Image (cartoon, grey):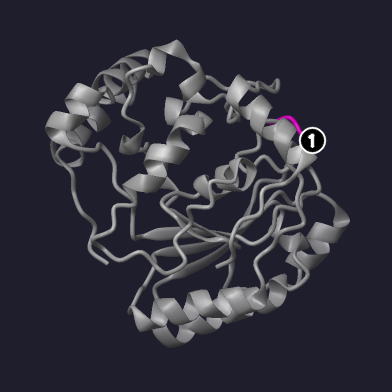
């Protein structure tokens, strides 16, 4: 899958990496300017989805439910999880499309709490051995509790374990994920279809509902109920702008990294969606 390079990625990103990204205030000002609708209409979107990495949201069950979780596991608890059959279908699509990811990350929630996690990791390893030897298979865990540690002890050595070793629900470097940019007057004229750096840094997302342009999008969709996941692997010509237009306006990551907070901040759009979620959880179509 060949990645489409936008004007900003080709020219502005070089300047940004050298000068802008080292200064938080300057970074936010520059992003504000280039995210305005007249600018994006002239130059196009800033970011594009990466074909390099993908994160599989295997489960939304978690034993910590951290404050400001980017999957909202505590605020919107769910027993939804990807099935073994869905993982097999995902792997078949990779083989049929000759897709070779740089990294496939098994995520959550807490992925070790998925009842079939070891079988799923073995399936991903089989794909790696037979079709994509350079692909890194990684499980991302909080490392919290003896139950989690016991499962990790059974994970094969070929799987990279990204263990954050969390000790509590409150983290030092989490941002206000449930603070929707659409609820902030500052973003009134923003073109949300431009996405953010997470599309490149984290890669695409995969959930029980299907494919998303970034790793956080599925966690937002399951709360708001837009039901806009792709049911087939997106092809190179699909920029998935319909998803970014809808999803990014609700994502706290859109505002950029930094500005870490330890308290829970929930803006009006999220408050309304979470209230409705508790009354009647949205039903999304399955992958």
Viewed as shown, does residue 234 lie left or right of 153?
Answer: left
**Picture residue at 12% right of the left edge, 30% below the top:** 42
**Picture residue at 22% right of the left edge, 63% below the top:** 2
Residue 16, image x, y percentages: 24, 28
* Residue 76 among those drawn in magenta: no
Quarter of the image for residue 236 reads bottom left
Residue 254, image x, y percentages: 44, 31
Residue 47, image x, y percentages: 29, 41
Q: Is residue 280 above or below residue 41?
A: below
Q: Residue furthest bottom?
A: 130
Q: Nearer the viewer, residue 275 or 212?
A: 275
Quarter of the image for residue 268 reads top right
Specify start and end residues of the magenta stretch as a single range.
167-171
**Is residue 131 shown to the viewer in this render?**
yes
Q: Quadrant of the C terminus?
A: bottom right
**Picture residue at 57% right of the left edge, 24% below the top:** 179
Q: Nearer the viewer, residue 55 or 285?
A: 285
Residue topped by disc 1: 168
Q: Is residue 211 above or below residue 274?
A: below
Q: Is residue 162 above or below residue 30?
A: below
Viewed as shown, does residue 41 lie left or right of 139?
Answer: left
**Is residue 267 shown to the viewer in this render?**
no
Q: Nearer the viewer, residue 200 or 135?
A: 200
Q: Quadrant of the N terminus?
A: bottom left
């Amino acid at each position: 899958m060949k990645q489409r390079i936008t004007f900003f990625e080709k020219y502005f990103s070089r300047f940004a990496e050298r000068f802008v990204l080292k200064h938080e205030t300057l970074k936010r000002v520059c992003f504000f300017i280039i995210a305005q609708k007249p600018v994006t209409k002239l130059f196009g979107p800033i970011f594009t989805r990466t074909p390099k990495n993908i994160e599989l949201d295997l489960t939304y069950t978690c034993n910590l439910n951290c404050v400001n979780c980017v999957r909202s596991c505590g605020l919107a608890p769910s027993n939804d999880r990807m099935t073994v059959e869905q993982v097999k279908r995902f792997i078949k699509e990779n083989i049929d499309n000759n897709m070779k990811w740089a990294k496939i990350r098994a995520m959550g929630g807490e992925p070790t709490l998925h009842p079939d996690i070891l079988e799923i990791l073995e399936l991903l390893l089989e794909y790696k051995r037979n079709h994509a030897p350079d692909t890194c298979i990684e499980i991302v865990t909080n490392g919290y509790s003896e139950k989690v540690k016991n499962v990790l002890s059974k994970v094969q050595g070929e799987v990279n374990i990204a263990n954050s070793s969390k000790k509590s629900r409150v983290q030092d470097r989490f941002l206000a994920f449930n603070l929707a940019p659409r609820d902030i007057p500052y973003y009134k004229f923003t073109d949300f279809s431009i996405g953010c750096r997470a599309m490149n840094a984290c890669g695409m997302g995969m959930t029980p509902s299907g494919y998303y342009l970034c790793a956080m999008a599925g966690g937002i969709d399951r709360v708001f109920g837009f039901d806009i996941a792709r049911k087939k692997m997106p092809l190179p010509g699909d920029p998935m702008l319909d998803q970014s237009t809808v999803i990014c306006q609700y994502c706290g990551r859109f505002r950029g990294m930094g500005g870490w907070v330890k308290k829970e901040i929930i803006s009006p759009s999220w408050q309304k969606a979470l209230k409705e979620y508790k009354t009647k959880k949205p039903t999304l179509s399955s992958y």
